[in-house]
Amino acid sequence: MRKIVFVTGNKGKFSEVKDILASKGIEVIQNKDGYPEMQEDELEPIAAYGAKLTAENLGMPVMVDDSGLFIKALNGFPGPYSAFVENKLGNQKVLKLMENEEDRAASFKSVIGYCEPGKEPLTFTGTVDGNIDFEEKGSGGFGYDPIFEYKGRTFGEWGDEEKNKVSHRRRALDKFLEWLQ
């Protein structure tokens, strides 16, 4: 069985990636050491930087994931700052920001960064377009899942197995797996 080191401290991300890659015969090993994230407006350079830095530091091939929720009415906010905003404000305050907004369009975006020591990093991007719901719904998933509506239900209502078939992370991982093979 092929093994990949996934550098993340996010339990939800690790669980999703582990489940998706296990179905393809790949074992995912979590490394929680983390890395300093550069401040950028786009996720791709952040994931590339993180993958290269951790591959060099660990001396082995690694994968990282940088994800974000991009809300149209908020000019793409929180975008690359999604984890920070989720930790400091939470879903209820994001919903408060959206209170008087008619345009509820949003995109979940995930960028997988992969790098081997001494090589340049590669990035694989997956996106899901949906809307910000008016309230939190469902107890599944993590982060913004209970407020991100896709095809009539929030990701929090989907359940992990079902969500993992359509999520932004799944779409990025599918591109990564296509390259890997």
Image (cartoon, rainbow, N blue to C red):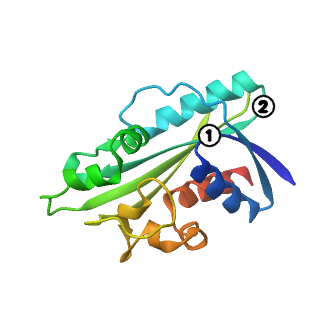
Can residue 12 be seen by looking at this rendering? yes
- The residue lying toward the viewer, choosing from 172 and 81, is 81
From what the image shows, is residue 91 above or below residue 44? below
User: Is label 1 or label 2 in front?
Assistant: 1
Residue 6 position within the rendered picture, expressed as x and y whole percent measured from the top left:
68, 42
Q: How far apart, in angstroms, are the residues tagged by discs 1 and 2?
A: 15 Å
Lower position in the chain sequence, tag 1 or tag 2: 1
| Residue 115 place in picture, x, y as percent | 67, 34
Of helix, strand and loop, which one carries label 1?
A: loop
Q: Position of residue 119 (x, y in %)?
A: 69, 28
Q: Quadrant of residue 122?
A: top right
Side of 67 where 92 appears, left or right: left
Left or right: 5 as drawn, with respect to 136 = right
**In which quadrant is the C terminus drawn?**
bottom right
Residue annotated with mark 1 = 8
Q: Which residue is identified by label 2?
A: 60
